[in-house]
Image (tube, helix red, strand yellow):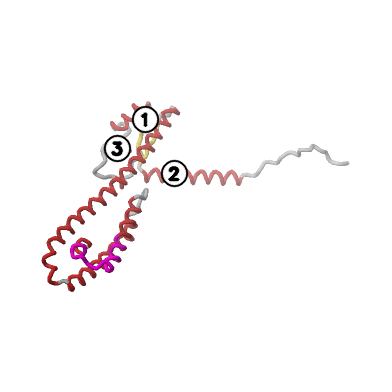
Amino acid sequence: LLSFLLVLRADGKRMRACFFWFLTFLATAYALLMAPEPQKRALFGAGIFLFVAIGKAVEVLKRTCEEREEEVFSLLFRAASCAFVAMMTLSMSFVYLQDGANLARIRRDLTERYAILEEAAKEGKQEVVLPLLHPQFKNKYSMAYVTEISAEDSGYYVNQALAGYYGIPVVRGIRRDDLSEQTETGANEERANADERKAEPEESKPEADGKGEEP
């Protein structure tokens, strides 16, 4: 729609609102894509800004066509071509932005995994449990999920390759959901133990001065 308006040379004052809401949509979508773990429902807010921009553009396009009826048909093909190119460019830009952000998140997960392995190797541990990659970050531009470790079989070839490289006998995988549950359970147990220690009666302390009873 913006391409139609640009080709038709619509009134700039009328197009200000369209550009404002469209740029607001782009800024909101970019901020959500750069978040570490964005929620899909949060994109609804960005979609509202896009719907408002489209509504404003339709209104301006209608008024422009009514005012320039004799020129509209000769410019439709050019406007449609520009709109198609702009739409494909915008779509490709969003794909690269989203997948690029996911690649950065995958790298963060892998860096965390390698840090755990290096620390376990220094401490001489016999077994190490590694969190799997976040499934929502999977995309066609990364091969990390093809060579992912297994949570069910510690004898999987990727697990064995990591174990052999870092000199650790057993390397296991664990899903993020299970890891969160274990962390929460461990925290609850620690709080319960702390409460039990507080509830235990304190031992009586001997007097420091050692004075006896007065006759």
Amino acid type for the residue under numbered disc 2: Thr
Look at mark 2 in the image and give the residue it sits on: 183
Q: CA distance from mark 1 to mark 3?
A: 16 Å
Rendered location of residue 140, percent (x, y): 24, 44
In magenta, the rendered stretch is: 5-22
Rendered location of residue 165, percent (x, y): 34, 27
Q: Do the residues bearing badges 2 and 3 touch, measured as CB atoms within 8 Å?
A: no
> Which quarter of the image is occupied by the C terminus?
top right
Q: Is residue 20 magenta?
A: yes
Amino acid type for the residue under numbered disc 3: Glu
Left or right: where 119 falls relative to 5: right
Look at mark 1 in the image and give the residue it sits on: 170
Left or right: where 57 falls relative to 167: left
Q: Residue furthest bottom?
A: 66
Look at mark 3 in the image and give the residue it sits on: 148
Amino acid type for the residue under numbered disc 1: Val
